[in-house]
Image: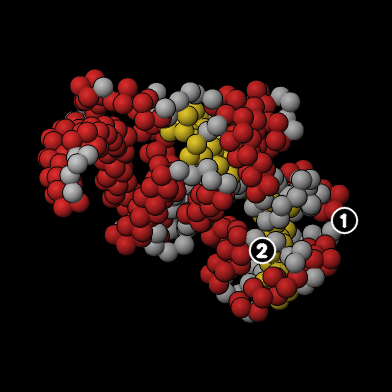
Amino acid sequence: MENKFRAISLSYKNAPVEIREVIALDEGSIHSLLVKLKDFFSVTDTLILSTCNRTEVYYSHDLDISAEIIKLIGLEKGLPNVVDFMEYFSILNDDRSAIDHLFKVAVGLEAQVVGDMQIANQVKRAYQASADLDMAGPFLHRLMHTVFYTNKRVVQETAFRDGAASVSYAAVELIEELTSNTYQPRVLLIGVGEIGEDVAKNMVHVPDAKVTITNRTFDRAKALADELGFDVIPFEQCFEAMKEADVVVSSIMKSEPFITKGLVQSMEIPSYKLFIDLSVPRSIETTIEEVPGVLLYNVDNIRSKATETLERRLASIPQVENIIAETIDEFYNWKKEMMVSPTINKLKNALEQIRQEEMSRFLKNADDKQIAMIDKITKSMMQKILKVPVVQLRAACQRDDADKMIDIISDLFDLEKVSENKEQ
């Protein structure tokens, strides 16, 4: 039975942030889960993608083991009740549906802010993690390089990636909108991971803002601040800096809330204080909204306003979908060829076995010149005999009728018996 490519997806479309943050996997958990899948289920061609908006597992297996994989995620996360989360997962067991979903995710069609540019790098890192553990075979290697080629075409041929319209840019647009009546708003950025760094770089769209950056690793914060002309403070001073800030953007990884209601209550808030939580799991307690003057936004309720950039991206979606469809068709042509390759190789081996046996029988007393000539003639004959079945097999692939042709040729040349004899 041929292994099918399948997908398990939990995303912002069917799971709120409080569910996503519980299921989210860090690099260590992804590595551990990949090893378990390899050891327990012998899965092949596996990809695990976990971002603030989605946790997904793509895998090849002849059986649907999606429920078992979800239980393994629960084991990894210490969730004895992970079965209660089953309703939030979408399971794609159809080969083409799983592949189509991966393409749409990688390009940004499935992103919360359409065309989010961060997802392409996140997919590359997920692929690298699989490759490092030898969990990417010829199928996944070819699939991922086709995904990367599709991304390149989208950038070159459409306006889908023009401008900046990521989650982090949406946060900057929100800051700009809510501080429009504040003279030189003071913005504190806590954490300069991928999202935090992107927020900092996009703050050029709020030129009047006074931006301060802090990070657990001071040197990283200082390098970014120096590059952008922002202020930088040691991480230990961030609580004091919060008191002075009009806007606090938090994008740090922490298992429990970093900014609590009690902390915010201790601050004097003369008019307003805006908190933006871009962390998953969330780093700001939701109850801070109960403090007068506090506004809180997280990754679920940030929305980019209808900018020209976003409109151009939305208008480009049909073109992007056409590119995806074209490249998936090309990939499937390769996949079909791969399907018949083992049969072609078995046929070549069967004919070569016959050729070698007959050569050894009739050329015992022949000299080197005769052997060389007959070897050349029989190889040429073998190539001509092979040509028709190989052409027919490849034609059957294009008709989606390869299974029938494989069975006919296997029976005709008794390839299974030849293969068994060779193994013995």
Describe the element under mark 1 as helix, strand or loop. loop
Q: Residue 378 at x, y = what percent?
A: 15, 41
Q: How many marks?
A: 2
Residue under numbered circle 2: 192
Q: Quadrant of the C terminus?
A: top left
What amino acid type is highlighted by mark number 1? Ser
**Label 1: few (<14), some (14–19) or many (≥20) C-alpha neighbours in 10 Å:** few
Residue with the most extreme front position? 365
Residue nearest the observer in this picture, 350 or 179? 350
State the image coordinates of residue 329 (x, y, percent, origin top left): 27, 41
User: In front of the other: label 1 or label 2?
Assistant: 2
Tag 1 and tag 2, C-beta contact below 8 Å: no
Looking at the picture, tell me which residue is in the foreground, 301 or 194.
194
Residue 105 on image: x %, y %: 45, 45
In this picture, residue 157 sits left or right of residue 34: left
Q: Secondary structure at mark 2?
A: loop
- The image shows residue 11, relative to residue 279, as above or below, that is above
Q: Which mark is residue 266?
A: 1
The kind of residue on which mark 2 rests is Val
